[in-house]
Image: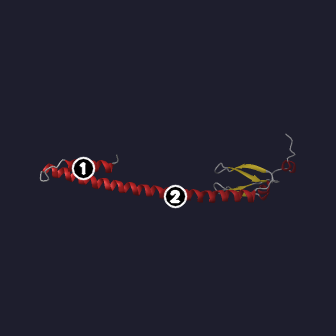
């Protein structure tokens, strides 16, 4: 039995008792029952509005999820596809500012610098102090 049915039951009980309408106690009891009916109607309306709002929020959440998937997946895929070269070697570089670990291609190392994708700090690569053997990987230790 829901709240509307309970209030209707109580009202039916009081109506069935055939109480003296002019008695002060009966008048108060009827006023309380009328108030309960009004409160019940308001609660029912609020419940319906809440259900509608919940459905709308769920739809917005689903739409946002689709937009996020499209936005982030396409950006990541595009960046990766544009920058990836199967023939190139890749090296891990750690940004000294934010500590983010970045994979860079040999071509980027040769260019001399790249901006950290995490913090924007310019990472410069200087090979001027290396010998030709060290650059070619022929150094023996």
Q: Position of residue 34 (x, y in %)?
A: 24, 54
**Residue 46 figure quarter:** bottom left
10 Å crowding of disc 2: few (<14), some (14-19), many (20+): few
Gap in Å between the C-alphas at discs 2 and 1? 42 Å
Secondary structure under the numbered disc 1 in the rendered image: helix
Please give the name of the residue rendered at 74% of the width and 53% of the height, measured from the top-left corner. 104
Residue on which disc 2 sits: 59
Q: Is residue 69 left or right of residue 90?
A: left
Whether residues under marks 2 and 1 lie with C-beta atoms below 8 angstroms apart, the answer is: no
| Label 2 or label 1, whichever comes before in sequence order | 1
**Nearer-the-camera pick, 3 or 100:** 3
Please give the name of the residue rendered at 33% of the width and 49% of the height, measured from the top-left corner. 3
Q: Position of residue 120 (x, y in %)?
A: 65, 57
Please give the name of the residue rendered at 25% of the width and 47% of the height, measured from the top-left corner. 10
Q: Position of residue 27 (x, y in %)?
A: 16, 52
Q: Position of residue 95 (x, y in %)?
A: 68, 51
**Nearer-the-camera pick, 33 or 128:** 33
10 Å crowding of disc 1: few (<14), some (14-19), many (20+): few
Secondary structure under the numbered disc 2 in the rendered image: helix
Q: The C terminus is located in which quarter? A: top right
Residue on which disc 1 sits: 12
Residue placed farthest to the top in the image? 141
**Nearer-the-camera pick, 33 or 88:** 33
């Amino acid at each position: 039995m829901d709240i509307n049915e309970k209030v209707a039951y109580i009202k039916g009980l009081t109506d069935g008792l055939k109480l003296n309408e002019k008695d002060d106690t009966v008048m108060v009891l009827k006023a309380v029952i009328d108030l309960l009916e009004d409160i019940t109607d308001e609660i029912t309306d609020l419940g319906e509005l809440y259900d509608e709002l919940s459905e709308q929020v769920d739809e917005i959440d689903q739409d946002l999820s689709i937009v996020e998937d499209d936005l982030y997946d396409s950006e990541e895929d595009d960046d990766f596809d544009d920058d990836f070269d199967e023939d190139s070697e890749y090296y891990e570089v750690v940004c000294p500012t934010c500590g983010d670990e970045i994979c860079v291609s040999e071509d980027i190392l040769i260019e001399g610098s790249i901006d950290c994708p995490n913090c924007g700090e310019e990472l410069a690569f200087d090979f001027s102090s290396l010998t030709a053997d060290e650059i070619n990987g022929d150094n023996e230790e």
